[in-house]
Amino acid sequence: MDKVVVGAAIVDGNGRLLTAQRADPPELAGGWEFPGGKVDPGEDDRTALVRECEEELGVLIEVGQQIGGDWPLAGGYVLRVWLARIVEGEPEAKEHLDLRWLAGHELYDVPWLPADLPIVRAVQGRLGGG
């Protein structure tokens, strides 16, 4: 059984994507990613994603369509990403160094973590101005 990490491609009403800058571990710090985290035992993917966004960003999200399938990560993990929108709260960087909203033409203005790059390409077609 794969170990699952979930990520949220949070898009706002202007078609911008929310990105989060990793604080740790040191080898990933400074890289940009989709907010999210590990699925706990007994938890389903969507529930984990809502919980992680609440913990990391202080927002309540509505989970939409999944982007692709299982994206491979190091250490036997797979990343599953969903489109999402914020239904309550303003995102704040509780566990990240920084957060940024990126319009379609700005998607590659940040150094994405390598594992997230193919997903950025998959999300790009769903954003305004991209």
Image (cartoon, helix red, strand yellow):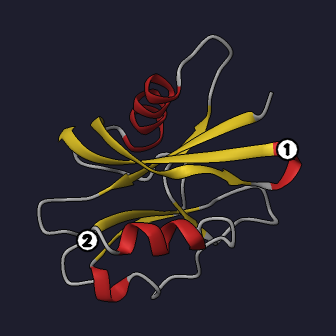
- Report whether 119 appears left or right of 22: left
Q: Where is residue 95 in the image (x, y as percent from the top left)?
A: 54, 47
Pointer 2: what residue? Answer: 127
Q: Which residue lies furthest to the top in this view?
A: 42
Residue plotted at (85% across, 44% down): 76
Q: In which quarter of the image is residue 74?
A: bottom right
Question: Is residue 58 placed above or below 29 in the rendered structure?
Answer: above
Quadrant in which the C terminus appears: bottom left
Q: Residue furthest left?
A: 13
For numbered disc 2, what is the local secondary structure? loop
- Other-residue count near label 1 (Cα within 10 Å), few / some / many at <14 / 14–19 / ≥20: few
- Other-residue count near label 2 (Cα within 10 Å), few / some / many at <14 / 14–19 / ≥20: some
Question: Is residue 110 placed above or below 74 in the rendered structure?
Answer: below
Whether residue 89 is visible, yes or no, is no
Distance of label 2 from label 1 (alpha carbons): 30 Å
Q: Position of residue 63 (x, y in %)?
A: 32, 37
Q: Looking at numbered disc 2 in the image, what kind of residue is underneath it? A: Leu
Q: Residue 92 has which mark?
A: none
Q: Looking at numbered disc 1 in the image, what kind of residue is underneath it? A: Gly
Whether residue 14 is visible, yes or no, is yes
Residue plotted at (43% across, 64% down): 19
Q: Quadrant of residue 114?
A: bottom right
For numbered disc 1, what is the local secondary structure? helix
Pointer 1: what residue? Answer: 76
Residue plotted at (57% across, 16% down): 43
- Report whether 32 appears left or right of 63: right
Q: Which residue lies furthest to the right in this view?
A: 75
Question: Is residue 39 placed above or below 81 in the rendered structure?
Answer: above
Q: Position of residue 97 (x, y in %)?
A: 54, 62
